Amino acid sequence: MGVIDFYAEKFYYYKVSWLITAKNREINTNIFSKRKSEESMIRIKRKTKRYLILLGLAAAVVILVLLIVHGVRSVLRPDTDTSAGLEYIQQEEAGSVAEIEDKINLLEQQERAEAGDSEDTRSVKERFSGAVVIGDSVTQGFSEYDILNTSSVVSKIGVHLYEADELIDQAEALSPGTVFLALGRNDLAATEGDVNEFISQYTDVLDRIANDLPDANIFVNSIFPVQDSAIEDDPYLADIADYNTALKELCDSRSIGFIDNTDLAEDQYFEPDGQHFTADFYPVWAEHMAEVAAL
């Protein structure tokens, strides 16, 4: 091979290499441009999608605001004049439960008078034949002095409200039409003067009776007052009046008859301990309950 052929071959080699390099650069440039174009399209699509989402959210907000405004206008629009009805409801709410009970009792008395049976000749035991008195040691006097039948008395000495389930079970077995509750005096000391706790426990008792004896009429006796000598032994007994006030409010809120026995507890009826009563007291108490419950 001559020198000319040698350099000619070298030249041909470098030319081919340069062409290949130039072609590769063109290819890479095209690929890069294509990638840039694709990336631009992706970014455009993303921005377009984002704008559409924002536009949709904005439209939803506008629709929601319009619906709310329409709803508020509908509520505030005075389509119907309800002032007369509201005034009537307010007047009805002003009447106390005691007034309603007085009217009912008056109507019952009038009905008896018209029927010619205003004087009830039945014995106390007969009048309580379908009733049960649930209570503590004071209630137990009905059985001890033979004022009521044993089937009309469910009692336990020293019982507290949180222990009343046992007594309620016994009463439920008797299927009474009327239930008189005479509980709470032992709970003044147990609740340490906490009236709210007392009402909470009494509410549980009422709920249990209403659940187990749904058809029975329920009446709640007030806690009997005691003499000063008893208060000296148990200072919590001085709060009986406050407890009775709260108990009456509870009964009124549930439309349950409340029997106020405060005036019945005269000094002549008290035992020496100043808390319990003699035999002469129980017919008076039984008659009072029978009148209130229209037995």
Image (cartoon, rainbow, N blue to C red):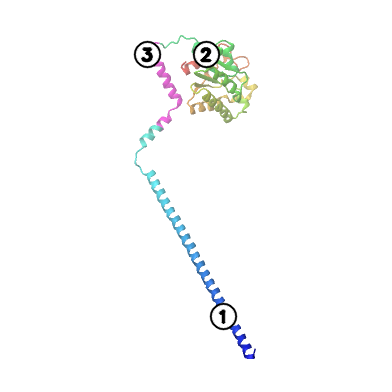
Q: Depth-wise, is mark 2 or mark 3 nearer the camera?
A: 3
Q: Amino acid at mark 2?
A: Val
Residue at horizontal 43 percent and vertical 24 percent from the top: 100
Residue 225 can be seen, yes or no: no
Q: Amino acid at mark 3?
A: Glu
The answer to whether marks 3 and 1 mark residues whose Cβ atoms lie closer than 8 Å is no
Q: In the rendering, which numbered label is found on residue 114?
A: 3
Pointer 2 residue: 284
Residue 196 can be seen, yes or no: yes
In percent of width and height, residue 51 lies at 46, 60
Location of residue 169 (image quadrant):
top right
Residue at horizontal 62 percent and vertical 89 percent from the top: 5
Pointer 1 residue: 19
Say what secondary structure mark 2 lies in.
helix
Say what secondary structure mark 3 lies in.
helix
Residue at horizontal 65 percent and vertical 21 percent from the top: 233
In percent of width and height, residue 104 lies at 42, 21
Within the magenta stretch, is there residue 85? no
Magenta region, main secondary structure:
helix
Real-space Cα separation, disc 3 to disc 1, in angstroms: 131 Å
Residue range of the region highlighted in magenta in the rendering: 90-116
- Residue placed most toward the observer, 181 or 35: 35
Q: Depth-wise, is mark 3 or mark 1 nearer the camera?
A: 1
Q: Amino acid at mark 1?
A: Leu
Answer with mark 3 or mark 1, whichever residue precedes in sequence: 1
